[in-house]
């Protein structure tokens, strides 16, 4: 369970990281790429922050994630500059891809398309009656 302190620090990190990453994407010539920080989890000892990023369009997601991971020290430094009056130590950042938007998108496409199990019950696997 997350403590209030963990939640507060995660909130600060999420807000500042969203700013930093969106600016980096725009400056890096990635116009039209939407980069958002969907969730930040901080460990109980506040040493590691798991950062979940949502990237749209999805086609560039893995490439961008690798960029974030390789630029982690720079991102951490920028974060330290912004939060120096709020945090003494900046946690190590671990970036992960949040594919929940893609998942939701696939569900919507399925429901709108020909694969709608409501219209076509044949798509659903038959359940055995016990």
Image (cartoon, helix red, strand yellow):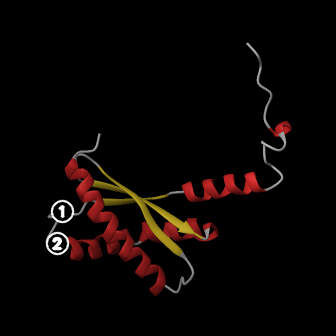
The residue lying at 40 percent from left, 72 percent from top is: 71
User: How many C-alpha atoms fall within 10 Å of the one at disc 2: few (<14), some, or many (≥20)?
Assistant: few
Numbered disc total? 2
Q: Quadrant of residue 57?
A: bottom right
Residue positioned 33% across, 68% down in the render? 15
Locate residue 73 relative to residue 114 in the image: left or right. left
- Front residue of 66/60: it is 60
Question: Does residue 80 show up?
Answer: yes
Is residue 45 among what the camera can see?
Answer: no
Residue located at (41% from left, 81% from top): 23
Q: In the image, residue 2 lies at what x, y percent?
A: 28, 44
Foreground tag (2 vs 1): 2
Q: CA distance from mark 2 to mark 1?
A: 8 Å
- Please give the name of the residue rendered at 82% of the width and 39% of the height, measured from the top-left corner: 123
- Residue situated furthest top in the rendering: 130
Residue under label 2, please give it. Answer: 84
Mark 2 element type: loop
Residue 125: percent from the left, percent from the top? 79, 32
Q: Nearer the viewer, residue 98 or 78?
A: 98
Quadrant for the N terminus, please. top left
Q: Which residue is mark 1?
A: 89
Q: Secondary structure at mark 1?
A: loop
The answer to which quarter of the image holds residue 112 is bottom right
Of callouts 2 and 1, the N-terminal one: 2
* Pointers 2 and 1 in contact (C-beta within 8 Å): no
Quadrant housing the C terminus: top right
> In the drawing, does residue 18 fall left or right of residue 122?
left
Q: Is residue 79 left or right of residue 87?
A: right
**Image location (x, y in percent) of residue 79:** 27, 72
Identify whether 19 is placed above or below 8. Answer: below
The local crowd at label 1, few if under 14, some if 14 to 19, many if 20 or more residues have their Cα within 10 Å, is few
């Amino acid at each position: 369970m997350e403590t209030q302190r963990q939640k507060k620090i995660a909130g600060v990190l999420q807000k500042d990281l969203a700013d930093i990453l969106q600016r980096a994407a725009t400056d890096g010539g990635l116009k039209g790429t939407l980069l958002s920080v969907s969730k930040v989890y901080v460990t109980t000892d506040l040493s590691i922050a798991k950062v979940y990023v949502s990237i749209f369009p999805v086609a560039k997601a893995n490439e961008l994630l690798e960029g974030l991971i390789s630029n982690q020290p720079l991102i951490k430094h920028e974060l330290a500059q912004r939060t120096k009056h709020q945090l003494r130590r900046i946690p190590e950042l671990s970036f992960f891809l949040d594919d929940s938007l893609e998942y939701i998108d696939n569900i919507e496409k399925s429901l709108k398309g020909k694969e709608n199990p409501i219209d076509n019950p044949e798509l659903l696997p038959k359940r055995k009656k016990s």
